[in-house]
């Protein structure tokens, strides 16, 4: 079974802190994604990567950056956390081109105080 | 870019009844339409998908229909059970694109009452 793991289930950070969210997949997938989930807004794509060291902006990249140094690992970075970044963050991975199943991690609930 | 709209946002049904969730999309080049189910405390999981070369697909109690002309697709769940209670997301993408992203609807909270 494909497994996507996220470093933390719950995280509490203070405003202005630098925050790292880590995601690891074990199926050698090319594509990896970071989403943000908020009530009533569904899944919004922050960034995605289709290869090592490659990244593409999604729909809401402002305030975030990403890093993909190894194929299995995709990190989401909040350079200076703000309260409006309090949310559920979901990582996903998929194999190949569009039209492939995305496998999601369990999510990280981030609270910024 | 693609815009996917999903309705209703909440849906309550009695156990045994059917549930229907509808989505529309804007990009006529989209040709892959998956549905994801998210249970409480978990990430979304693919439950069924359809490609634009077919009009309907079934898997036991769930089915998806696609109308390419009208640019809408629907999820049908028959004989609903309490364990069907979850958030359901529809999505669309251009299959074959090297970037592989999905465009999601905003989700439907389905509650099945025993």
Image (cartoon, helix red, strand yellow):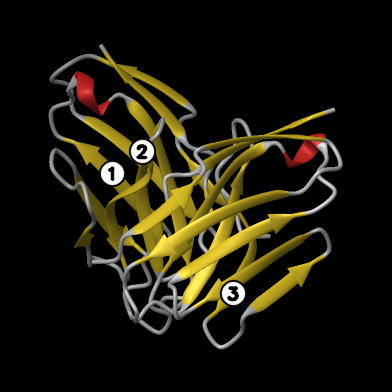
- The residue labelled by disc 2 is A41
The chain letter under disc 3 is B
Residue A27 showing in the rendered view: no
Nearest the viewer among A16 and A37 is A37
Q: Quadrant of the C terminus of chain B?
A: top right
Nearest the viewer among A16 and B41 is B41
Q: Is residue A49 left or right of residue B7?
A: left
Q: Is residue B66 left or right of residue A110?
A: right
Callout 1: few (<14), some (14-19), or many (20+) C-alpha neighbours within 10 Å? Answer: many
Q: Callout 2: helix, strand or loop?
A: loop
Q: Is residue B21 above or below residue B93?
A: above
Callout 3: few (<14), some (14-19), or many (20+) C-alpha neighbours within 10 Å? Answer: many
The chain letter under disc 2 is A
Q: Is residue B64 left or right of residue A39?
A: right
Which residue occupies 31% across, 47% down?
A75
Residue at the far front: name it: B70
- The residue labelled by disc 1 is A76
Q: Is residue B24 above or below residue A87?
A: below
Asked if the residue under mark 3 is in contact with the one under mark 2, i.e. CB atoms within 8 Å, the reply is no
Say which label, 2 or 1, has the lower sequence index: 2
- The residue labelled by disc 3 is B50
Q: Is residue A89 above or below residue B27?
A: above
Distance, label 2 to label 1, CA atoms, is 20 Å
Which mark is nearer the camera, 3 or 1?
3
The quarter of the displayed image where residue A53 is located = bottom left
Which residue occupies 39% across, 67% down?
A31
């Amino acid at each position: 079974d494909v497994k996507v793991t996220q470093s933390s289930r719950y995280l509490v950070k203070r405003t202005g802190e630098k925050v790292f969210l880590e995601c690891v997949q074990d199926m050698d997938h090319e594509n990896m994604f970071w989403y943000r989930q908020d009530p009533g807004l569904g899944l919004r794509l922050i960034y995605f990567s289709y290869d090592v060291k490659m990244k593409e902006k999604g729909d809401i990249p402002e305030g975030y950056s990403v890093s993909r140094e190894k194929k299995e690992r995709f990190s989401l970075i909040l350079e200076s956390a703000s309260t409006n970044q309090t949310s559920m963050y979901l990582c996903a991975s998929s194999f190949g081109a569009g039209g492939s199943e995305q496998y999601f991690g369990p999510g990280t609930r981030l609270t910024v105080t | 870019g693609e815009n996917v709209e999903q309705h209703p946002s909440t849906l309550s049904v009695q156990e045994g009844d059917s549930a229907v969730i509808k989505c529309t999309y804007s990009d006529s080049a989209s040709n892959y339409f998956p549905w994801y189910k998210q249970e409480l405390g978990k990430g979304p999981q693919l439950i069924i998908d359809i490609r634009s070369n077919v009009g309907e697909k079934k898997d036991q109690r769930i089915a998806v229909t696609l109308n390419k002309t009208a640019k809408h697709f629907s999820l049908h769940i028959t004989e609903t059970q309490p364990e069907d209670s979850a958030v359901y997301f529809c999505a669309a993408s251009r299959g074959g694109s090297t970037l592989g992203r999905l465009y999601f609807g905003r989700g439907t909270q389905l509650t099945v009452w025993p």
